[in-house]
Amino acid sequence: MSGDRTRHPGEYIRDAAWLPHAYDADRDAFVFAHLPRDLQRRVVFIDRRFVPKQLLSPLVPIADLPLDLIDERRGPLHFIFHTGFCGSTLLSRALDIPGVSMGLKEPAILTSMGRALHGGHEIAEPLDLSLRLLSRPLVAGETQIVKPSNATNPLAREMMRSIRGSKALVLYSDLQAFLCALVRRNLQGRIMGRNFFCGFMPAIPLQSRYGRDELLKHTDLQIAAHAWLMQVAALERLAQRFGPDRVRFIKDTTLFHERPKTLQRVADFFELNMTPEQIDSLSRSGVFDEEAKKPGAPFDAAKREEERASANAIYEDELVHAQNWARELAARSVAPLTLREDIFD
């Protein structure tokens, strides 16, 4: 489909399988990706690593898109924001329920918006349009539930402001679990922690007053802990801004160990039309027995806890140092060290 320049812009709107995939800020244009439900199920994330180039459209100027048709096709849209490594991909996969909802796993268009913002571009209008396009249901009556990358947490407030009536479930793990997830990924995890820091610092900084020379002296895990605190503080401000009617929190361990109860409350919060029988069937479905990011690999919540404990034992000194330092930073910055869990309130 790449290179097809005969397609009318309206065709990208009428077929909800055409998802906005990338934004060219210099040309004010979108690239779309053609991803029917079966393909969305197979890709780990809806981003450039997993979406083949042959599924992409040429650049489509926003000025050529029929905006009235977009509003005709739009539907309900909610969000799953998260702190990373806490089961958000698993939950979004579980919300692929034909006739009820569809979970969109880290759409690249939102990451593209973040890059445009960091590049100094105005993104309010293209971000709003992206979300309206993502809200189009694959089947009439379905609700779209977008799980962005946690790298886009600085945009969470704008996303919620853009889509009136949208709700956000914030899924999180604690700081220790976040740091253990990074060290288990060895060098890649440490690089990820620093990348999070670099992405969050310009947009959602803490009032830490650390200078460049001081930051250079910090360990990998101190930098990662700083990044975790930045996003947690931003998500807490999100909840304060929009209130409990629109933002609720849940911890990863609750999702894993209280599955039916959690799924019922998530369905209620997002106003999904599901029967108790459907909830029970979903809670026992194979989606919770498979690694969300490694299709075919078995998932075991107890084993996950064992792996965290093992990482904590191996890297205990470094983890304790980073967590103690994070407590000092949180107090100094008036940032929360924990988030509440109010999904069941």
Image (cartoon, rainbow, N blue to C red):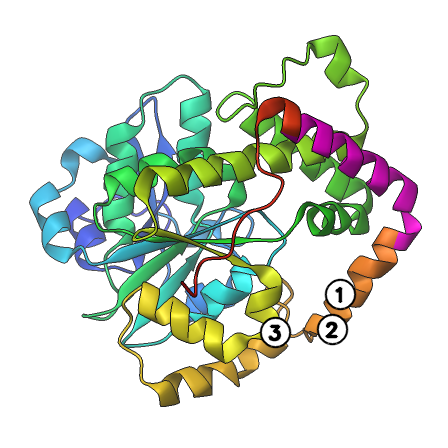
- Residues tagged 1 and 2 counted as in contact (Cβ below 8 A): yes
Q: Which residue is mark 1?
A: 305
At x 64% / y 69%, what residue is drawn?
291
Q: In this rendering, is residue 180 above or below 332?
A: below
Q: Which residue is mark 3?
A: 257
Looking at the image, residue 315 sits to the left or right of residue 21; the answer is right
Q: Please provide percent x and percent y for residue 187.
A: 81, 40
Looking at the image, residue 259 sits to the left or right of residue 28; the answer is right
Image quadrant assignment for residue 25: top left
Which of the marked residues, 3 or 1, is nearer the chain's N terminus?
A: 3
Q: In this rendering, is residue 123 above or below 252?
A: above
Between 239 and 63, the one nearer to me in the picture: 239
Q: Which residues are magenta?
A: 313-330
Looking at the image, residue 196 sits to the left or right of residue 245; the answer is right
Q: Please provide percent x and percent y for residue 250.
A: 51, 58
Amino acid type at mark 2 = Ala
At x 83% / y 42%, what residue is drawn?
319
Image quadrant assignment for residue 321: top right
| Secondary structure predominantly adopted by residues drawn in magenta | helix
Amino acid type at mark 1 = Glu
Q: Residues within 10 Å of mark 2 (few under 14, many from 20)?
A: few
At x 68% / y 45%, what residue is drawn?
175
Q: In this rendering, is residue 289 above or below 339?
A: below
Query: Does residue 96 appear anywhere in the picture?
Result: no
Q: Which residue is mark 2?
A: 302
At x 54% / y 37%, what residue is drawn?
231
Query: Does residue 229 appear anywhere in the picture?
Result: yes
User: Is 325 in the magenta?
Assistant: yes
